[in-house]
Image (cartoon, grey):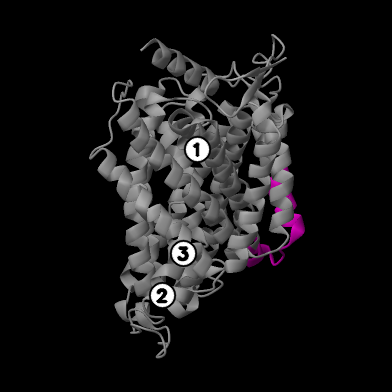
Amino acid sequence: MVEQSKNSTVEYENVEKDYLQKRQLKKGVAGWILLASLGVSYVISGDFAGWNFGFAGGGFGGMLIATIIMALMYACMVFGLAELSASLPTAGGGYSFARRAMGPWGGFLTGTAVLLEYSIAPAAIAIFIGAYVNEIFGFNGPMVYAACYLIFVAIHLFGAGEALKVMMVITAIAVIALLVFSFTLIPHFDGSNLFDIEVNQQAVGASTFLPQGYLGIWTALPFAMWLFLAVEGVPLAAEETGNPSKDMPKGIIAAMAILLVFAALVLFIAPGVAGSELMKDHGAPLVGALQVIYGQQSLIPKFVNIVGLFGLIASFFSIIYGYSRQVFALSRAGYLPRFLSVTNRHKVPTYALVIPGIIGFLLSLTGEGDLMITMAVFGATISYALMMLSHIILRIKEPDMARPFRTPGGVITTGIALVLSVVAFISTFFVSLYAAMWSAVFYAILVGYFAFYSRHHLVASVPEEEFAAIKQAENDLG
């Protein structure tokens, strides 16, 4: 049976009685410390590889300015997400927030943008893992990428609690690698090494600080985002959190504070020791910086290389968790094919883990890590803008909504994040028009699926749609 929803452009279908019983996540497996670890884990691979490509277009100065801009954007956004995730704690994350604020279309556009980011980012990380493996063992390629997906998807299939604990251990090891890198290289820092990239005299505003001129700041923005990208995935764990109204804000804010420290360390120390010229296209920049000082056969670079793999693995592992929960929420509500949200006996969505993993593996075969970063940023920036717009709309439309945590600065804070996310979105076209256009094609395919099919087959009994129905009933009574 199909029911036309009132005042909407969507239709709902009746489902079998045990529909939600087949689609349940395990409750109470995460507290705020585990959530903070999850937030750091999502991002920490960005400290080990990928961010340094920003030196190629922006030099150190362009990358520094870009990082400051993106740090401001993420800090403002995290405060907004802390409020939203405490108020609307469902596995849909950004999709749930936008669904409440802007209806089914807003929810789908936000959720699929998050999905675009989270399905492509692991492909980039798999490529960087291959570069680190090559430094250690001398081989790289499809077998390395396939092993990443097979091993870590398999671990997730055994349950969220088990997977998150493994993730926490891996993240702790990666943090140790970053600290060893920092403390061993700080005495060798030389500020002149930061500005060793040749100046393009034809570029407007070119200098040793900005070797490619002002345009270099724009081209560095996506790579500066790589130092923070995916921290917004913490709210995806809301339904598996013991006390989301308290734990969500504490977890995501603590994660962001830690990531700001790590970003500052790698941004200054690696080029300050090895030079921005060497770092701008290095597949394993932290190892490369250590090798400049200690030599290729020294134990310290080898240690950081081996342990640094854990940083890449931590992000790879946790983003797999993130994309599976986003697919789960969209599928459970009928926005994506419903079979994707069926959970196994460990209460884990099997197909939501496996199918995006296959797609990510195929993307990793390109071997173009910087291309994958740009594509992931394309999706991320769309979702950021829509999530921040959702915060602003909900503050206006629902001022009395329960808010266990309130964003400092209110809509001004999220307004800053909204504007900067649009700026970052535009930058993807400057970095690689090819990557941006392919991202747009994938996004358009998903939107087409919703427009012509799934919006006529939604499920009314899931949390996000029930919230909307309750709100509509309250408005009708009012």
Q: Which mark is residue 215?
A: 2
Q: Which residues are magenta?
A: 131-150
Q: Mark 3: which secondary structure?
A: helix
Viewport quadrant of the C terminus: top left
Separation of marks 1 and 2 at Cα, in angstroms: 39 Å
Three-letter amino acid code at disc 2?
Leu
Residue annotated with mark 3: 427
Seen at 39% across and 70% down, the residue is: 217
Which residue is at a point 49% across and 56% down the rendered structure image? 46
Q: Which residue is mark 1?
A: 168
Picture coordinates of residue 106, whole percent (x, y):
51, 37
- Name the quadrant containing residue 129: bottom right
Q: Which mark is residue 351?
A: none
Judge depth for marks 1 and 2 and give the one in front: 2
Q: Is residue 184 visible?
A: no
**Circle 1: element type:** helix
Please identify the residue farthest to the right as the structure is shown: 143
Circle nearer the N terminus (1, 3):
1
